[in-house]
């Protein structure tokens, strides 16, 4: 009997601790208040694309980060944040086109000598840098994150509304899931992909959607936001962002 009395509260404490770790960061309440101001009713794929406010500003094919043509069938969407507190989406587009984001090309590491990814989002726009049918260099070197995933970088520059950036990213992820039949469980943070030979293998990225560097309640909340926009979609023809 005494033992039972001892075990019961311990179980309760453990349950409380596990609930705590799955609870999103309280800041999501402020983010949601900002996100929920605009139209959130049903949309066709074209209307969702219009909400995303996409600007295509591709790295010219055959140059810098697109020097090599590396086709891809997208199976995942990988979410990052820039951790650049001064550059906006247009600055990143320029840097990518100029080949300014160099990386050490090495066996088992970066394969082309440049960092590249598909989209950069900020509060008012999403800029596309790579066609979705080409591989980027943003996640895990020669791993599945680069071989099969569309990379989205969220801006963090001063003055940028992070809540609106996150919501635009969720809309874009939903649109990509719809057009490429990617399951919601395949929308992953950069943290998901281990990087061979780098410590720590799992990067704390995007840091503001992870909880102490782990996928927990805040990431779950973001996935639900993607699901929310996916469920707004009225089926119809969708343009592939190839
Ligand atoms: Zn990242």
Image (cartoon, grey):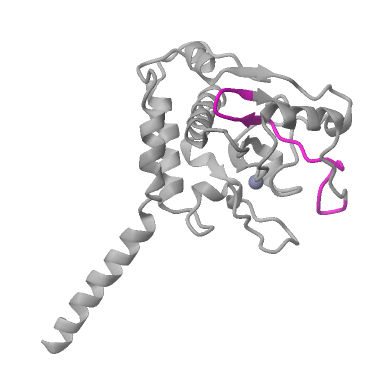
Task: Please state which of residues 41 and 78 is positioned toward the viewer in this rendering.
Answer: 41
Residue 182: percent from left, percent from top: 53, 32
In magenta segment, residue 123: yes
Residue 31: percent from left, percent from top: 41, 37
Instruction: Say which residue appears at 68% left-offset and 43% top-offset.
Output: 84
Task: Please state which of residues 154 and 5 is positioned toward the viewer in this rendering.
Answer: 154
In magenta segment, residue 64: no
Instruction: Say which residue appears at 20% left-offset and 76% top-offset.
Output: 9
Is 70 located above or below residue 196 in the figure? above
User: Looking at the figure, which quarter contains the N terminus?
Assistant: bottom left
Outermost residue on the left side: it is 1
Instruction: Say which residue appears at 44% left-offset and 12% top-offset.
Output: 44
**Image-based side of 183 in relation to 125, left or right:** left
Q: Which residues are magenta?
A: 106-126
- Residue 68 seen in the figure: no
Task: Please state which of residues 212 and 198 is positioned toward the viewer in this rendering.
Answer: 212
Is 191 located above or below residue 160 in the figure? below
Say which quarter of the image contains residue 100: top right
Outermost residue on the bottom side: it is 2
Residue 206: percent from left, percent from top: 57, 46
Instruction: Say which residue appears at 43% left-offset and 48% top-offset.
Output: 218
């Amino acid at each position: 009997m005494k033992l039972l009395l001892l075990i019961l509260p311990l179980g309760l404490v453990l349950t409380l601790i596990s609930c705590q770790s799955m609870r999103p960061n309280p800041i999501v309440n402020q983010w949601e208040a900002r996100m929920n101001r605009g139209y959130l009713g049903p949309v066709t794929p074209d209307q969702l694309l219009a909400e995303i406010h996409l600007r295509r500003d591709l790295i010219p094919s055959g140059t810098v980060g697109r020097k090599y043509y590396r086709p891809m069938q997208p199976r995942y969407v990988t979410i990052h944040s820039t951790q650049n507190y001064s550059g906006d989406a247009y600055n990143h587009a320029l840097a990518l086109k100029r080949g300014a984001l160099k990386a050490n090309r090495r066996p088992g590491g970066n394969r082309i000598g440049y960092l590249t990814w598909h989209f950069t989002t900020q509060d008012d726009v999403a800029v596309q840098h790579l066609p979705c049918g080409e591989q980027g260099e943003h996640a895990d070197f020669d791993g599945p994150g680069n071989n099969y995933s569309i990379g989205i970088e969220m801006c963090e520059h001063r003055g940028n509304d992070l809540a609106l950036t996150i919501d635009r990213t969720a809309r874009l992820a939903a649109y990509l899931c719809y057009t490429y039949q990617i399951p919601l469980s395949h929308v992953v943070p950069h943290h998901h992909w281990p990087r061979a030979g780098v410590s720590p293998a799992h990067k704390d990225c995007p840091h503001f959607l992870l909880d102490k560097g782990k996928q927990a309640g805040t990431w779950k909340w973001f996935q639900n936001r993607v699901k929310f926009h996916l469920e707004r979609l009225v089926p119809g023809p969708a343009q592939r962002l190839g």
